[in-house]
Amino acid sequence: MIFDRMSLKSKTAIVTGAAHGIGRACALALAEAGADVAVIDLKDTVFKTADEIRALGRKTIPVIADISDEEQMNEAIERIIREWGKLNICFCNAGTFQDIPAEDMPLEEFERVIRVNLTGAFITARAAGKAMIQGNIPGSIILTASMSGHIANIPQCQCAYNSSKAGVIMLGKSLAIEWARHKIRVNTISPGYIRTWSDEPLKPEEVGTSNFEQWTPLRRFGSADEIQGLIVYLAGDTSGFVTGSDYVIDGVIPHFKEENMMMKYSKRVAGIILCAAMAGNLLAGCSANQKTETAADKAESEVSQTQQPSEKTSEKPSANVPKIRLVSWQTPSDPKTKPVYDAVMEFAEAHKSEFTLEHENILGDELKAKIKTDVASNTVPDVFLYWGSGGNSAMLLDADVIIPFDEYLEASAKIKRDLFPEESFARTSSGETLATITLGMEYGVWFCNQELFDKYQLKLPETLDDMIEAGKVFNENGIVPFAMGSKGGNPAHEFVAEILGQMPNCEEDFRIINEEYTVDTPNIRKTLEIIENMRENHLFPADTISIGDWNQHFAMYNEGKAAMIYAWTWQLSNMSQEMADKTVIIPAPIMPGGTRDTANFARSGGDMGYVISRNAWEDPAKREAIITLVDYLYSKEIQELSLYSGGGIPSRLDIEVDASKVSKAKLADVINFAKGKESCPNLPQACPKTECWTDFADGIDELMAGISTPEQVIENIDKSLAAAKDE
């Protein structure tokens, strides 16, 4: 039977870019067809996709990884092979986009797009192909290209994107030829205008309203679920003779567009010019002062990039109303952030007589790459979310890219320092200069899996010695005692600061790093020796690099593979209710040499807040609009929305938390446990120069992995600090 032959039972698959859109839809389709599916993305919403796969009764492995990072992708696929033993299917779907005129595009931006879309596809396909060859698996590899690999779209300026996707098509054909002898099939798909920015269906009244829909003969966007059947077909055995092919799923746009759209578009523009000219002649006789709308004004594009559109207020503003560019992490496709996103857009609509809002959504570390590119091209957003700690904001402040936040506070009548806890400013400052104010507080706490401690009749740890003794039992039973890793310093830099925070007069150590450019203090030496002691006693996972970064180490605890973890509240969105029910919060175990009462100690802070472009602030037409917008972004309304919809802990002091409305697992318990307790700074804010942080992070990575000793770490970091001081 054909449906039996299309079954993917007993097969394993990986899907990149699986947090939303085509990747998510196709990961679920592969699971519905019977495959176990590992999902990879840079966004932590990939864990939601993993939960959906589990609900279908299939196995999954969620991984946070960058497809353009060779090491990360190799590690991800090696992990899948270790756990599942084989790989049958690889759908390399992740990618990125740009819409910048070629003459204005920095070389770094062009190279970034090529690196993600083309090089990333090669890195992923090569790792998957190698695993299939070594396992003697006749596999299927599918690469996402684009109709833009066949045509040059208008009106978008996307030469890098088009070039990268054309390259993906030829990469697929080339790999199909090379790997045919291994019985590995390689095909590409080229989607057209697919509505991937939201998993919610369009409302009936919204269908057909975009130019992109008008340019498609079917008069609508495609949907991600219309890609699913093709992916299941290409992944399975029924397509056994199909390889080296490219499948265009575009509602026939290329043929229609190449033959008809350019003519139609040119006629439309010509008609507009003619009408404008006629209107100009007519109106000239009526009023010499009345401005005629130009053809360029009329022909302005309604949307930019179809897969990740920026949102604008609905009516075109008058020439006197400034446009404000806002970049945030709120997206309409994420249920946790959608209420805040919608509120901001509604606020902008209500104030459209004062400004028009262009709202872009860029998540995670992609934001850093974006801002770096914008600085190089002098296109920095007017207001954007960013990390305020010295290790991140110093460069922007030093280069006068952003204003010291106190300039805004002095100008605002609604937002003042005394609305926020004083200790929060330390994490959002570079030296004595305030870069921003955190939008939300975060708490770092110790979690223990009570079920595991009860199973092996172990007491919850109160000291490091208790941890070591419990660790021996857990190791004997195949359980990692303490989930902690370090890759790029994450998340271990917070753990290092947690231990340093127990040392006597630790605030002085953070000051010395920042002002005297050295980490060679007795407390820091003691802290690094404790980390080394924990590693030597096998409290950490065997490979601290591969489970480094925030989501990997938390996934180890959430899946019941580790007994303890030090984690932050923003990670709780990844905690299942089942694990929340097993989890207890404990005071930090007392470390050797520590003098702090850990029952009254819980590190707190939060270094993400909105920063303001210096150029925009100095523009008289924009300043009042910026004040109005930022006032609202820090308003009580927004912070309460963030708390009850997404689990963000308010940074404002005038908000009382109603535990009954908090939906995020364990969050109310953490707030009750940690609020009001003593805290200490973190390492990025102590780092005096942005460029030094890489060396800080590398040192922590090497210490956790056993590559370097505490003495070597101190020596290497001090060399970096000395070089920075001499600049």
Image (cartoon, rainbow, N blue to C red):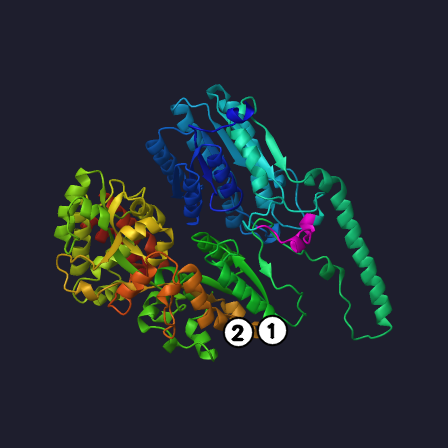
Among numbered discs 1 and 2, the one appearing first in the sequence = 1
Dot label at residue 628: 2
What percent of the width, then of the height, locates residue 606?
35, 63
Secondary element at image label 1: loop
Question: Foreground: 657 or 138?
Answer: 657
Residue 19 position (above or below residue 172): below
| Closer-to-camera residue (687/312) | 312
Comparing 193 with 176, the one in front is 193
Q: Residue at x 49, y 33 (%)?
A: 33
Tell me if residue 212 is in the magenta stretch. yes
Residue at the spot x=53%, y=42% of the render? 22
> Which quarter shows the N terminus?
top right
Q: Tag 2: residue type?
A: Thr
* Residue with the mark numbered 1: 354
Q: Position of residue 655 (x, y in %)?
A: 38, 72
Establish if 663 lies above or below 112. Answer: below
Hey, what amino acid is under mark 1?
Glu
Whether label 1 touches label 2, CB < 8 Å: yes
Residue 160 percent coordinates (x, y)? 57, 45
Residue at 57% from the left image edge and 72% from the top image edge: 622
* Residue 542 magenta: no
> Looking at the picture, how far across and down is residue 459, in whole percent?
15, 51
Q: CA distance from mark 1 to mark 2?
A: 9 Å
Specify whether 102 is left or right of 549: right
Residue 668 vs residue 232: left or right? left
Query: Which quadrant: the C terminus?
Result: bottom left
Magenta residues, as a range?
201-213
Q: Is residue 418 left or right of residue 370?
A: left
